[in-house]
Image (cartoon, rainbow, N blue to C red):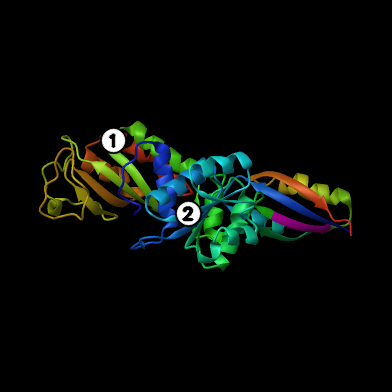
Amino acid sequence: MTKTFARFSTLFDWLAWYIGASLLPGGSVPQCMRFVIIGAGRVGLRTARVLREEGHEVSVIERDEAMIRRARNQEFTVVEGDGSREDVLEEAGIADADALGALTGDLNVNFTACMIANHYGCRTIMRIDEAYREGIYRKYADEVDEVIYPERLGAIGAKNALLGGTIRAIADIAPHLQVVELTITNGAPVNGYTISELQLPANATVLAFGKRDQDLGLPDEDLSLEDGDRLVVLADYGVLSEVRQLLVGESEAQAAANTGSDATSGTGGVN
Amino acid sequence: MVTAFIMVKANTGEADRLRDSIESIDGVQSAHIVAGDVDIIAKASVETPAAVKEIAATQIQGIDGIEDTQTYIAMD
């Protein structure tokens, strides 16, 4: 599971997959890893499911009885209790875990759990509850490896769905860097070019390419760009609308509207 | 002397600016950015309860980017 290539039937599946991907370390991922997820709500349980489907071991911590029942009905290993307590985390196997997903709606619980898990050498993912806090926790929360704001991720997915297919935001890499998947159209200025002939702006680079109806792969310089082919591009926000114009053939106004205010968002998100 | 702890909820990511503004208020001894459902906790030490109110309700709440404050007076 890398953060770039996958297909989803619903927005929520994509969100769970994205959070699951955040829990995994960069580079090659071992066959079976151990994860502890705190919070068996919609976000936590879906994330647990995605990880389990990929063959990883997951245990879930939850304190609400109805939520515990629901998780157990889906055959998850559930530890009952407060995820900010060390003994509860230990019971859930934090000592042997590779990563912790602190995905409750309670920031105090999430942060405390990340501190404890960090002490045990786990990778830590913390869910936050308000957009403005993303930057604060990225800067100050040394114990937290990645900050997740599900509402913003959901909005990226919803925006992509509304835009209708030719452009798909995949991930924010840094405050000004984004990975997007674009589908070449007949009207695109580069339609018919080969990949080696393609000249993107300086702050953009092609990561992967896939012919229509084929899987994405590393870009082969000799392949031609045609209607329906897909390119995955890493680009700075400043050149994103230019990239879109080149590859999708949007008018300048359309492209600006599709990137527009995102570029000025202080949290680095596609809102 | 009155010692008070003021919990500050922000509505902006500019936590540094808020902390620095709060720390520069007369009577505020320290301010820290914290994890949890508030963003900054400040400690004030002043002569009267009225001065605590002046710091929390007027000065801190007057800073752009502050959503809300909650004040606790020390009893010891």
Q: Measuring 35% from the left and 46% from the top, which residue is drawn there?
A: A170
Q: Which residue is mark 1?
A: A165
Task: Reply above or below: B15 against A160.
Answer: below
Residue A58 disc label: 2
**Residue B16 showing in the rendered view:** no
Q: Earlier in the sequence, mark 2 or mark 1?
A: 2
Q: Position of residue A164 (x, y in %)?
A: 30, 32
Relative to B4, A46 lies left or right: left
Identity, as a three-letter code, of the amino acid under mark 1: Gly
Task: Reply above or below: A10 against A225.
Answer: above
**Residue A62 showing in the rendered view:** yes
Q: Residues within 10 Å of mark 1 (few under 14, many from 20)?
A: few
Q: Measuring 64% from the left and 52% from the top, which residue is drawn there?
A: A82
Q: Measuring 24% from the left and 40% from the top, which residue is drawn there?
A: A245
Identity, as a three-letter code, of the amino acid under mark 2: Val
First to last magenta residue range: B41-45
Relative to A248, B75 lies left or right: right
Quarter in which the C terminus of chain A is drawn? top left
Rendered image quadrant of residue A227: top left
Relative to B25, A50 lies left or right: left
Which sits in the foreground, A96 or B71? A96
How far apart, in angstroms, are the residues tagged by discs 2 and 1? Answer: 33 Å
Task: Give me the chain letter of mark 2.
Answer: A
Q: Residues within 10 Å of mark 2 (few under 14, many from 20)?
A: many
Q: How many numbered markers are drawn?
A: 2
Principal secondary structure, stretch drawn in magenta? strand
Whether the residues at callouts 2 and 1 have beta carbons within 8 Å, the answer is no
Which sits in the foreground, A113 or B30? A113
Relative to A85, A212 lies left or right: left
Which sits in the foreground, A109 or B6? A109
A127 is within the stretch colored magenta: no
Q: Position of residue A44 (x, y in %)?
A: 51, 46
